[in-house]
Image (cartoon, rainbow, N blue to C red):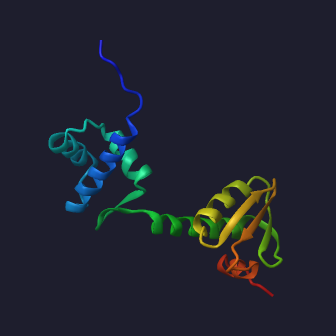
Amino acid sequence: MSEYKLKRDPQEAEKIKAAIVEILEENSKRSQFEIKEELFNKLGFEVSQPSVHRYLTGELSMVKDKEKGWIKAEKEKKEQHRETLSVLLKDFVVERIAPVQLVVLKLEPGYAGLINLHLTEGYSDTVAGSVVMGDGLLVAVKDNEDGETLLEKLGFIVE
C-alpha cells in the first residue's frame, strides 16, 4: 500500500519554486507540462501539472502572456482591479463623503465587499485600510495621500 503525501515539505516546496523560476529564466514560454517534465527529468521533483499551475499562478504570482510567456502578474493584476473598480464605481456608488484622509462611499446594497477587494488590491499604494459597512465602504488613505487625491484617481470630480 502506497502512502499518499497530502502536503509537501515547505523546504522542498521552496526548492521547487526556485527551480521553476530557473526553468522560466531559460525559456519563459514553456508550457506547464514542459515545466513538470523538466522538474522531474532534470531535478527529480515529482510534481503534478495542477501543482505546477498552483505554483505559477498562486505562489509565484505569474500569468502567461501570449508574447512574453510566463511573467510576474503584479502590474497586470493591479490594472485589472483598477479597470473593474472603475466600472463598479460608476454603476453602484450612490453617494460619497470625503473628508481629508478618509473616504466614505455609500453603495448599492451587496457591492461593498466586491468594490473593497478591487480598491485595496488596485490601489494598495494609496489605501492604508478599509472597512466594509453593509451598504458602504470606509477607506483610510496613507499619510502621503489625501481623500481628494484618491477620489480623483477613481474618476470622481472633486469640488
The image quarter containing residue 116 is bottom right
| 40 relative to 158 in the view: left or right | left
The image quarter containing residue 67 is bottom left
Residue 151 in the image, given as x and y percentages of width and height: 72, 78
| 150 relative to 79 in the view: left or right | right
Q: Residue furthest bottom?
A: 159
Q: Residue furthest left?
A: 42
Q: Give the residue drawn at x 52%, y 69%.
A: 79
Q: Name the quadrant of the N terminus.
A: top left
Image position of 18 with respect to 6: above or below: below
Q: Residue furthest front?
A: 11
Residue 106 in the image, given as x and y percentages of width and height: 82, 64
- The answer to which of 159 and 11 lies nearer the viewer is 11
Image position of 77 with respect to 37: above or below: below
Image position of 97 with respect to 159: above or below: above
The image quarter containing residue 108 is bottom right
